[in-house]
Amino acid sequence: MIIVLKTGATPEQINHICEKVKELGLTPQVSRGVERTIIGVIGEEAKIRVQPLEVYPGVERVMPIQKPYKLASREFRPESTVFTMANGVKVGGDQIVVMAGPCAVEGADVLMRIAGEVKKAGAAFLRGGAFKPRTSPYSFQGLGEEGLKYLREAGDRFGLLVVTEVMDTRTVELVSKYADMLQIGARNMQNFDLLKEVGVSKKPVLLKRGLSSTIQELLLSAEYLLSKGNFKVMLCERGIRTFETATRNTVDINAVPVLKEQTHLPVLVDPSHGTGKREYVIAVARAAVAAGADGIMVEVHDNPEEAKSDGPQSLYPEQCADLVRQLRPIATAIGRSL
Ligand code: PEP
Ligand code: MN
Protein backbone atom coordinates (compact mmCIF):
# COMPACT_ATOMS: atom_id res chain seq x y z
CA MET A 1 0.00 0.00 0.00
CA ILE A 2 1.27 3.51 -0.71
CA ILE A 3 0.01 6.78 0.67
CA VAL A 4 0.45 9.60 -1.83
CA LEU A 5 0.69 12.91 0.00
CA LYS A 6 -0.58 16.29 -1.16
CA THR A 7 2.10 18.50 -2.71
CA GLY A 8 2.22 20.81 0.29
CA ALA A 9 2.05 18.17 3.05
CA THR A 10 3.93 19.46 6.12
CA PRO A 11 6.55 17.51 8.13
CA GLU A 12 4.10 17.48 11.08
CA GLN A 13 1.40 15.91 8.93
CA ILE A 14 3.88 13.32 7.62
CA ASN A 15 4.96 12.44 11.18
CA HIS A 16 1.36 12.18 12.29
CA ILE A 17 0.50 9.77 9.46
CA CYS A 18 3.60 7.67 10.22
CA GLU A 19 2.58 7.46 13.88
CA LYS A 20 -0.92 6.33 12.94
CA VAL A 21 0.50 3.69 10.58
CA LYS A 22 2.73 2.37 13.39
CA GLU A 23 -0.25 2.26 15.77
CA LEU A 24 -1.85 -0.15 13.29
CA GLY A 25 1.17 -2.43 13.68
CA LEU A 26 2.50 -1.54 10.20
CA THR A 27 5.81 -0.01 9.09
CA PRO A 28 5.93 3.33 7.26
CA GLN A 29 8.74 4.10 4.80
CA VAL A 30 8.89 7.70 3.65
CA SER A 31 10.14 8.46 0.15
CA ARG A 32 10.71 12.17 -0.51
CA GLY A 33 10.64 12.94 -4.22
CA VAL A 34 11.16 16.24 -5.99
CA GLU A 35 7.48 16.46 -6.87
CA ARG A 36 5.84 14.74 -3.92
CA THR A 37 6.31 12.57 -0.91
CA ILE A 38 5.04 9.02 -0.73
CA ILE A 39 4.72 6.81 2.34
CA GLY A 40 5.03 3.09 1.73
CA VAL A 41 3.13 0.96 4.21
CA ILE A 42 4.58 -2.45 4.83
CA GLY A 43 2.70 -5.20 6.58
CA GLU A 44 -0.68 -6.81 6.48
CA GLU A 45 -2.77 -4.67 4.19
CA ALA A 46 -6.04 -5.90 5.67
CA LYS A 47 -5.36 -3.72 8.71
CA ILE A 48 -5.65 -0.58 6.58
CA ARG A 49 -8.99 -1.54 5.19
CA VAL A 50 -10.59 -1.18 8.62
CA GLN A 51 -8.94 2.20 9.16
CA PRO A 52 -9.08 4.37 6.02
CA LEU A 53 -5.97 6.54 5.99
CA GLU A 54 -7.55 9.14 3.71
CA VAL A 55 -8.94 10.87 6.84
CA TYR A 56 -5.55 12.28 7.85
CA PRO A 57 -4.62 15.79 6.75
CA GLY A 58 -2.03 15.81 3.99
CA VAL A 59 -3.15 12.54 2.38
CA GLU A 60 -4.15 12.76 -1.26
CA ARG A 61 -4.87 9.09 -1.94
CA VAL A 62 -4.09 5.58 -0.76
CA MET A 63 -3.31 3.00 -3.41
CA PRO A 64 -2.44 -0.68 -3.30
CA ILE A 65 0.83 -1.71 -4.98
CA GLN A 66 -0.04 -4.56 -7.32
CA LYS A 67 3.47 -6.01 -7.51
CA PRO A 68 4.67 -8.50 -4.86
CA TYR A 69 7.66 -6.25 -4.21
CA LYS A 70 6.63 -2.87 -2.84
CA LEU A 71 9.50 -0.59 -1.78
CA ALA A 72 11.54 -1.68 -4.81
CA SER A 73 8.76 -0.72 -7.21
CA ARG A 74 8.57 2.42 -9.34
CA GLU A 75 5.09 2.97 -7.92
CA PHE A 76 6.63 3.54 -4.50
CA ARG A 77 9.41 5.76 -5.82
CA PRO A 78 8.76 7.12 -9.32
CA GLU A 79 12.15 8.86 -9.51
CA SER A 80 15.28 6.80 -10.03
CA THR A 81 17.36 6.21 -6.92
CA VAL A 82 20.71 7.96 -6.91
CA PHE A 83 22.97 7.37 -3.94
CA THR A 84 26.25 8.98 -3.04
CA MET A 85 29.27 6.94 -2.00
CA ALA A 86 31.73 7.95 0.74
CA ASN A 87 33.97 9.85 -1.72
CA GLY A 88 31.12 11.68 -3.48
CA VAL A 89 30.78 9.30 -6.46
CA LYS A 90 27.12 8.97 -7.38
CA VAL A 91 25.54 5.64 -8.26
CA GLY A 92 22.46 5.75 -10.49
CA GLY A 93 23.01 9.31 -11.68
CA ASP A 94 23.98 10.58 -15.13
CA GLN A 95 27.47 9.22 -14.74
CA ILE A 96 27.99 5.56 -15.58
CA VAL A 97 30.21 3.81 -13.03
CA VAL A 98 32.84 1.24 -13.91
CA MET A 99 33.84 -1.39 -11.34
CA ALA A 100 36.94 -3.33 -12.25
CA GLY A 101 39.52 -5.60 -10.69
CA PRO A 102 40.51 -9.22 -10.33
CA CYS A 103 38.05 -12.01 -9.68
CA ALA A 104 39.82 -12.76 -6.40
CA VAL A 105 42.35 -10.90 -4.29
CA GLU A 106 45.44 -13.08 -4.74
CA GLY A 107 48.12 -11.03 -3.01
CA ALA A 108 49.13 -7.49 -2.06
CA ASP A 109 51.45 -6.72 -4.99
CA VAL A 110 49.30 -8.13 -7.75
CA LEU A 111 46.23 -6.31 -6.41
CA MET A 112 48.12 -3.03 -6.13
CA ARG A 113 49.29 -3.32 -9.75
CA ILE A 114 45.81 -4.12 -11.04
CA ALA A 115 44.26 -1.34 -8.94
CA GLY A 116 46.66 1.20 -10.48
CA GLU A 117 45.71 -0.02 -13.95
CA VAL A 118 41.95 0.11 -13.44
CA LYS A 119 42.24 3.59 -11.93
CA LYS A 120 44.19 4.74 -14.96
CA ALA A 121 41.54 3.17 -17.19
CA GLY A 122 38.80 5.26 -15.53
CA ALA A 123 37.19 2.89 -13.04
CA ALA A 124 35.54 4.35 -9.94
CA PHE A 125 35.41 1.06 -8.00
CA LEU A 126 37.96 -1.64 -7.35
CA ARG A 127 36.38 -5.09 -7.24
CA GLY A 128 37.92 -8.31 -5.93
CA GLY A 129 36.78 -11.21 -3.81
CA ALA A 130 38.36 -11.97 -0.44
CA PHE A 131 35.66 -14.53 0.34
CA LYS A 132 35.05 -16.53 -2.82
CA PRO A 133 31.96 -18.64 -3.53
CA ARG A 134 33.57 -21.48 -5.50
CA THR A 135 31.70 -24.35 -7.07
CA SER A 136 34.38 -26.78 -5.89
CA PRO A 137 35.57 -26.90 -2.28
CA TYR A 138 39.07 -27.64 -3.66
CA SER A 139 39.28 -24.34 -5.58
CA PHE A 140 40.93 -21.21 -4.12
CA GLN A 141 38.55 -19.87 -1.46
CA GLY A 142 40.05 -16.39 -1.04
CA LEU A 143 42.38 -14.71 1.44
CA GLY A 144 39.68 -13.68 3.89
CA GLU A 145 40.47 -10.69 6.12
CA GLU A 146 43.99 -10.41 4.71
CA GLY A 147 42.42 -9.87 1.28
CA LEU A 148 40.08 -7.23 2.69
CA LYS A 149 43.09 -5.33 4.06
CA TYR A 150 44.80 -5.38 0.67
CA LEU A 151 41.63 -4.12 -0.97
CA ARG A 152 41.35 -1.23 1.46
CA GLU A 153 45.01 -0.30 1.02
CA ALA A 154 44.74 -0.38 -2.77
CA GLY A 155 41.46 1.55 -2.71
CA ASP A 156 42.95 4.24 -0.49
CA ARG A 157 46.17 4.47 -2.47
CA PHE A 158 44.41 5.06 -5.79
CA GLY A 159 41.20 6.80 -4.66
CA LEU A 160 39.02 3.85 -5.66
CA LEU A 161 35.91 2.67 -3.87
CA VAL A 162 36.03 -0.95 -2.78
CA VAL A 163 33.29 -3.46 -3.61
CA THR A 164 33.68 -7.01 -2.36
CA GLU A 165 31.52 -10.01 -1.67
CA VAL A 166 30.11 -10.95 1.71
CA MET A 167 28.97 -14.56 1.85
CA ASP A 168 27.88 -15.06 5.40
CA THR A 169 25.86 -13.27 8.07
CA ARG A 170 28.78 -13.81 10.48
CA THR A 171 31.17 -11.69 8.37
CA VAL A 172 28.91 -8.74 7.48
CA GLU A 173 30.50 -6.60 10.17
CA LEU A 174 34.03 -7.60 9.21
CA VAL A 175 33.56 -6.97 5.48
CA SER A 176 31.77 -3.68 6.24
CA LYS A 177 34.85 -2.47 8.11
CA TYR A 178 36.94 -2.57 4.91
CA ALA A 179 34.51 -2.25 2.00
CA ASP A 180 32.56 0.71 0.65
CA MET A 181 29.97 -1.55 -0.97
CA LEU A 182 28.93 -5.07 -0.03
CA GLN A 183 28.42 -7.50 -2.88
CA ILE A 184 25.85 -10.25 -2.51
CA GLY A 185 26.80 -12.86 -5.07
CA ALA A 186 24.56 -14.72 -7.48
CA ARG A 187 24.71 -17.85 -5.35
CA ASN A 188 23.52 -15.95 -2.30
CA MET A 189 20.76 -13.89 -3.90
CA GLN A 190 18.19 -15.86 -1.95
CA ASN A 191 20.13 -16.20 1.28
CA PHE A 192 17.41 -14.39 3.14
CA ASP A 193 19.23 -14.17 6.47
CA LEU A 194 22.19 -12.56 4.70
CA LEU A 195 19.88 -10.12 2.93
CA LYS A 196 18.31 -9.13 6.26
CA GLU A 197 21.69 -8.66 7.93
CA VAL A 198 23.04 -6.54 5.07
CA GLY A 199 19.77 -4.60 5.09
CA VAL A 200 20.32 -3.72 8.73
CA SER A 201 23.96 -2.75 8.08
CA LYS A 202 22.90 0.19 5.85
CA LYS A 203 26.05 -0.22 3.73
CA PRO A 204 25.61 0.30 -0.02
CA VAL A 205 24.89 -3.06 -1.64
CA LEU A 206 25.45 -4.68 -5.00
CA LEU A 207 22.90 -7.46 -5.34
CA LYS A 208 23.66 -9.92 -8.12
CA ARG A 209 20.96 -11.88 -9.89
CA GLY A 210 20.93 -15.58 -9.15
CA LEU A 211 22.04 -18.00 -11.85
CA SER A 212 18.51 -19.25 -12.36
CA SER A 213 16.45 -16.46 -10.85
CA THR A 214 13.73 -14.47 -12.48
CA ILE A 215 13.69 -10.68 -12.50
CA GLN A 216 10.82 -10.78 -10.04
CA GLU A 217 12.81 -12.96 -7.65
CA LEU A 218 15.72 -10.51 -7.91
CA LEU A 219 13.38 -7.66 -7.00
CA LEU A 220 11.93 -9.61 -4.08
CA SER A 221 15.46 -10.17 -2.78
CA ALA A 222 16.08 -6.43 -3.09
CA GLU A 223 12.85 -5.91 -1.16
CA TYR A 224 14.44 -7.73 1.81
CA LEU A 225 17.22 -5.11 1.88
CA LEU A 226 14.83 -2.19 1.44
CA SER A 227 12.40 -3.47 4.04
CA LYS A 228 15.24 -3.34 6.60
CA GLY A 229 15.74 0.33 5.71
CA ASN A 230 18.70 0.00 3.32
CA PHE A 231 17.87 1.84 0.11
CA LYS A 232 21.42 2.04 -1.21
CA VAL A 233 20.97 -0.96 -3.43
CA MET A 234 22.28 -1.56 -6.94
CA LEU A 235 21.06 -4.58 -8.89
CA CYS A 236 23.33 -6.61 -11.14
CA GLU A 237 22.55 -8.66 -14.22
CA ARG A 238 25.42 -11.15 -14.48
CA GLY A 239 24.07 -13.68 -16.94
CA ILE A 240 21.68 -16.54 -16.37
CA ARG A 241 21.75 -20.25 -17.19
CA THR A 242 20.25 -21.15 -20.53
CA PHE A 243 20.61 -24.05 -22.97
CA GLU A 244 23.38 -22.14 -24.74
CA THR A 245 26.86 -23.53 -24.22
CA ALA A 246 28.91 -21.18 -26.43
CA THR A 247 29.25 -18.85 -23.47
CA ARG A 248 29.42 -19.46 -19.71
CA ASN A 249 26.09 -17.73 -19.10
CA THR A 250 23.63 -15.74 -21.19
CA VAL A 251 23.44 -12.03 -20.41
CA ASP A 252 19.77 -11.19 -20.20
CA ILE A 253 20.04 -7.79 -21.82
CA ASN A 254 16.24 -7.55 -21.61
CA ALA A 255 16.62 -7.35 -17.84
CA VAL A 256 18.09 -3.86 -18.16
CA PRO A 257 15.04 -2.08 -19.64
CA VAL A 258 12.67 -4.31 -17.66
CA LEU A 259 14.38 -3.40 -14.38
CA LYS A 260 14.59 0.28 -15.31
CA GLU A 261 10.84 0.23 -15.85
CA GLN A 262 9.86 -1.83 -12.81
CA THR A 263 12.20 -0.42 -10.18
CA HIS A 264 13.83 2.84 -9.18
CA LEU A 265 17.05 1.03 -8.19
CA PRO A 266 20.21 1.46 -10.30
CA VAL A 267 21.25 -1.42 -12.55
CA LEU A 268 24.72 -2.78 -13.24
CA VAL A 269 25.76 -5.37 -15.83
CA ASP A 270 28.64 -7.82 -15.38
CA PRO A 271 29.66 -9.04 -18.84
CA SER A 272 32.64 -10.97 -17.41
CA HIS A 273 30.59 -13.60 -15.58
CA GLY A 274 27.88 -13.02 -18.17
CA THR A 275 29.99 -14.34 -21.05
CA GLY A 276 32.90 -16.15 -19.40
CA LYS A 277 35.18 -15.17 -22.29
CA ARG A 278 37.23 -12.00 -22.53
CA GLU A 279 36.69 -11.87 -26.30
CA TYR A 280 33.02 -11.01 -25.78
CA VAL A 281 33.18 -8.79 -22.71
CA ILE A 282 33.62 -5.40 -24.41
CA ALA A 283 30.85 -5.99 -26.98
CA VAL A 284 28.35 -6.98 -24.29
CA ALA A 285 29.41 -4.05 -22.09
CA ARG A 286 28.67 -1.69 -25.00
CA ALA A 287 25.23 -3.27 -25.41
CA ALA A 288 24.55 -2.91 -21.68
CA VAL A 289 25.32 0.80 -21.62
CA ALA A 290 23.26 1.33 -24.78
CA ALA A 291 20.38 -0.53 -23.09
CA GLY A 292 20.44 1.87 -20.14
CA ALA A 293 22.67 0.23 -17.52
CA ASP A 294 23.97 2.56 -14.81
CA GLY A 295 27.30 0.79 -14.62
CA ILE A 296 29.51 -2.07 -15.70
CA MET A 297 31.52 -4.55 -13.63
CA VAL A 298 34.45 -6.30 -15.27
CA GLU A 299 37.22 -8.61 -14.17
CA VAL A 300 40.75 -7.46 -14.97
CA HIS A 301 44.06 -9.24 -14.44
CA ASP A 302 47.57 -8.39 -15.62
CA ASN A 303 48.46 -12.05 -15.94
CA PRO A 304 45.19 -13.92 -16.56
CA GLU A 305 47.06 -17.13 -17.38
CA GLU A 306 48.16 -17.32 -13.76
CA ALA A 307 44.93 -16.04 -12.23
CA LYS A 308 43.61 -18.18 -9.38
CA SER A 309 40.08 -17.86 -10.75
CA ASP A 310 38.26 -16.69 -13.87
CA GLY A 311 41.39 -16.02 -15.96
CA PRO A 312 39.64 -16.72 -19.30
CA GLN A 313 37.11 -13.95 -18.72
CA SER A 314 39.54 -11.42 -17.26
CA LEU A 315 40.45 -8.45 -19.44
CA TYR A 316 44.05 -7.34 -19.80
CA PRO A 317 44.55 -3.85 -18.30
CA GLU A 318 44.85 -2.25 -21.74
CA GLN A 319 41.53 -3.85 -22.72
CA CYS A 320 39.95 -2.31 -19.64
CA ALA A 321 41.16 1.12 -20.77
CA ASP A 322 39.85 0.38 -24.26
CA LEU A 323 36.50 -0.66 -22.80
CA VAL A 324 36.09 2.70 -21.05
CA ARG A 325 37.11 4.52 -24.24
CA GLN A 326 34.51 2.59 -26.23
CA LEU A 327 31.75 3.15 -23.68
CA ARG A 328 32.19 6.94 -23.55
CA PRO A 329 30.61 7.84 -26.92
CA ILE A 330 27.74 5.45 -26.22
CA ALA A 331 27.12 7.12 -22.87
CA THR A 332 27.19 10.54 -24.53
CA ALA A 333 24.78 9.40 -27.24
CA ILE A 334 22.14 8.56 -24.62
CA GLY A 335 22.67 11.72 -22.59
CA ARG A 336 24.98 10.28 -19.96
CA SER A 337 28.65 10.52 -19.13
CA LEU A 338 31.52 8.32 -18.09
C1 PEP B 1 32.03 -12.21 -8.46
O1 PEP B 1 31.61 -11.14 -8.96
O2 PEP B 1 33.11 -12.28 -7.89
C2 PEP B 1 31.20 -13.42 -8.53
C3 PEP B 1 31.53 -14.53 -7.86
O3 PEP B 1 30.14 -13.30 -9.33
P1 PEP B 1 28.72 -14.08 -9.31
O4 PEP B 1 28.24 -14.06 -7.90
O5 PEP B 1 27.90 -13.26 -10.24
O6 PEP B 1 29.01 -15.46 -9.84
MN1 MN C 1 34.89 -14.21 -11.01
Image (cartoon, helix red, strand yellow):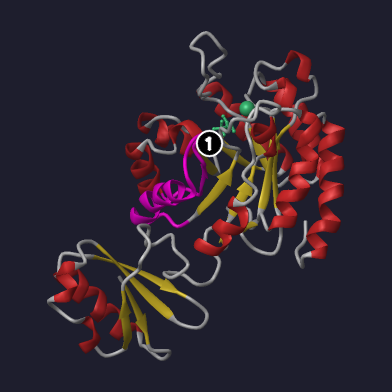
Instruction: Give the magenta range.
Output: 202-231
Q: Is residue 165 left or right of residue 152?
A: left
Quick one: which residue is furthest to the top in this view? 138
Q: Which residue is mark 1?
A: 178
Quadrant where the C terminus is found in the figure:
bottom right
Q: Nearer the viewer, residue 314 or 14?
A: 314
Percent position of residue 45, x then y:
21, 67
Q: Identity of the amino acid at label 1?
A: Tyr
Q: Give how far across and how far down residue 200 sits, in percent.
A: 35, 48
Please indicate whether residue 155 sits to the left or right of residue 8 in the image. Answer: right
Which residue does the image show at 41% across and 54% down from the upper left? Answer: 230
Q: Is residue 58 left or right of residue 149?
A: left
23 or 109: nearer the eye?
Answer: 23
Q: Position of residue 248 (x, y in %)?
A: 65, 27
Q: Residue at x 67, y 38 (%)?
A: 126
Q: Can I make out residue 250 in this image?
A: yes
**Residue 10 placement: quadrant:** bottom left
Q: Is residue 241 above or below residue 50?
A: above
Question: From what the image shows, is residue 230 above or below residue 148?
Answer: below
Residue 39 place in picture, x, y as percent = 34, 73
